[in-house]
Every structure is written in structure tokens, then in C-alpha cells.
Image (spheres, rainbow, N blue to C red):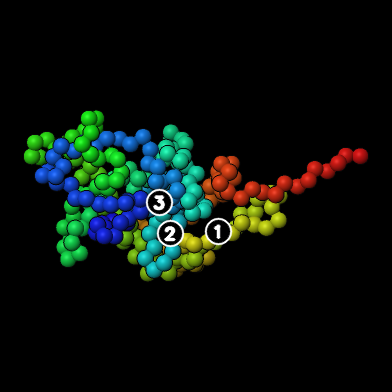
């Protein structure tokens, strides 16, 4: 979730270019009306700093594989997003937008695999950065502009949150609490439930059976409220299912035939 080398493009990024005064001295950054590429993205990474907020809007689960990261589900099928339209504009004004999306098209990246130094980069295909008539300048003479300083500060905060997230995920792996996730939804009128897999979640039975010292450790290191936020958020999976059915991007329940009256 955190720093990525330019040859390892993270989700939504089609390219990365280091920002520098010599090449981008006349460039500006402008606000995008929408991020169209998010419309076909059903899961977005989040940091632990966001759990308390995102659990009110999205289900929080963990990606599959040996190096899981927290993600929020915005759709239950690949290529679907129930919160953003085809142009990448949110359907709702008051919905929480994850920091991963708000950071785009910028991020801090390692330019060399043998160095820990991070540089501010941007996606040159985003349409948000370029030699425009409108927008805010990225440089003020030879120095970064106030807009660039604000962007850099946000990206640094995101990196720090990413480090806290990695620490939490290490704790989850060590505790053995994660298991392969499965959710079954049985809509009214459907003969069989719809089964969703391909993610990880906390094993509630193992969680309930933790020893007192194990539970105390999770509480002391801040993991306990994060686990609870994750578990509470799982109820939102049914909300996502309902949104997909309403928007015509999910399975349509079979309607029972009407009973004729005598």
C-alpha cells in the first residue's frame, strides 16, 4: 500500500513520473471532475487510520494471499463500483472517499530498489497535472508552491498511516486470526444463496476464544478497536449487494409467480 517503485504500478496508476523543477516548472495541478478509472474498481486499499470512518460506509476486508492489506469493497464483482458512476463521480455527496483516492494522481515512491529515499511522483496520464491555463502552479520560481507542499504533506501522512497499517497486518498474521472469507446472501425469491469469496476476514470463533493476555495485548497495541471496526463493517456487504441489484449490476432475484385468487 505504501511506497512503490515506478516499475511496480499500484492500483489505478498507469504511469509514474518524478516531479522536478527542470521538467515541470510550468506545470499546474487541477481538480478532476471525476476519476473514471475507479468506476471499474470494486476494492480500494485503506489504512488503519481510516477504519473508524470507512466502516460506516463500506465493508472492510483483507486481500487474499500471503501479504494481505485492508481494502474496502465498493462492489461485489470485478468491474463494478456502486459508489461512483461511469465518469468516476460519486453518487452521494456525503460518502467518505478513502485517502487512497484523494491522494491520486500523486504518491511518494522509491525511484531505486536499493534506496529508501522517497520522491514525490505523479501519474502523467491522469489529466490532472500538465501545462494548463487553469489550476494551481506546482512551483513558485525555483521552490515548490504551497499547493505542492500541501500535496507532499498529505502523501507523507499517507505513508505514515501505511506503516501503521503494516504493523497491524503483522499483528494479524502473528495472531492467526485471519481466515479465508465467505459471505452467503439469500435474497427473497432466490432458490440458492449467492456466495462471495476471494478475501480474508477475522475468524470470529478464534477471536472469541482468545486468552485474556492475548486480548490484553491486542487492546494495548491498538489492534482491538480496529478488529471490531472490521467485524461491524461486514454487515455492509449486504448493503453493497442491494446497491448492485438496484443499479442493475448484480444478480436479479427470481420473482415468485403471483397467486391467482379464486
217 vs 37: above or below: below
Residue 30 position by quadrant: top left
- Calculate the distance from the C-alpha at mark 1 to the C-alpha at mark 3: 17 Å
- Calculate the distance from the C-alpha at mark 1 to the C-alpha at mark 2: 14 Å
Q: Which residue is mark 1?
A: 196
Residue 147: tell me if it is visible.
no
Q: Which residue is mark 2?
A: 62
**Furthest-right residue in this view:** 262
The local crowd at label 1, few if under 14, some if 14 to 19, many if 20 or more residues have their Cα within 10 Å, is some
In the structure shown, which secondary structural element does the residue marked by tag 3 occupy? strand
Q: Which residue is mark 3?
A: 44
**Residue 117 place in picture, x, y as percent:** 16, 58
Q: Are marks 1 and 2 in contact (CB under 8 Å)?
A: no
Residue in the image at 29% along x and 46% along y: 125
Residue in the image at 32% along x and 51% along y: 13
**Furthest-top residue in this view:** 134
- The N terminus appears in which quarter of the rendering? bottom left
In front of the other: 150 or 76: 76
Which numbered circle lies on residue 148? none
Residue 165 position by quadrant: bottom left
- The C terminus appears in which quarter of the rendering? top right
Question: Which one is earlier in the sequence, the residue at label 3 or at label 2?
Answer: 3
Amino acid at each position: 500500500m505504501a511506497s512503490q517503485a515506478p516499475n511496480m504500478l499500484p492500483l489505478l496508476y498507469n504511469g509514474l513520473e518524478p516531479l522536478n523543477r527542470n521538467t515541470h516548472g510550468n506545470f499546474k495541478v487541477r481538480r478532476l471532475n471525476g476519476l473514471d478509472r475507479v468506476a471499474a474498481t470494486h476494492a480500494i486499499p485503506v489504512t488503519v487510520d481510516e477504519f473508524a470512518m470507512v466502516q460506516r460506509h463500506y465493508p472492510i476486508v483483507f486481500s487474499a494471499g500471503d501479504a494481505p492489506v485492508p481494502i474496502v469493497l465498493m462492489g461485489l464483482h470485478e468491474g463494478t463500483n456502486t459508489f461512483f458512476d461511469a465518469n468516476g463521480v460519486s453518487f452521494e455527496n456525503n460518502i467518505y472517499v478513502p485517502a487512497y483516492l484523494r491522494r491520486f494522481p500523486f504518491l511518494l515512491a522509491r525511484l531505486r530498489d536499493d534506496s529508501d529515499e522517497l520522491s514525490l511522483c505523479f501519474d502523467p496520464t491522469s489529466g490532472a497535472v500538465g501545462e494548463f491555463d487553469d489550476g494551481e502552479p506546482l512551483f513558485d520560481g525555483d521552490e515548490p508552491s504551497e499547493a505542492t507542499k500541501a500535496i507532499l504533506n498529505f502523501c507523507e501522512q499517507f505513508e505514515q498511516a501505511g506503516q501503521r497499517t503494516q504493523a497491524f497486518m503483522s499483528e494479524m498474521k502473528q495472531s492467526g486470526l485471519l481466515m479465508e472469507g465467505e459471505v452467503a446472501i439469500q435474497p427473497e425469491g432466490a432458490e440458492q444463496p449467492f456466495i462471495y469469496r476471494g478475501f480474508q476476514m477475522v475468524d470470529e470463533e478464534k477471536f472469541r476464544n482468545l486468552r485474556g493476555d492475548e486480548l490484553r495485548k491486542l487492546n494495548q497495541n491498538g489492534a482491538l478497536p480496529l478488529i471490531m471496526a472490521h467485524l461491524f463493517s461486514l454487515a455492509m456487504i449486504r448493503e453493497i449487494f442491494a446497491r448492485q441489484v438496484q443499479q442493475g449490476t448484480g444478480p436479479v432475484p427470481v420473482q415468485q409467480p403471483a397467486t391467482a385468487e379464486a
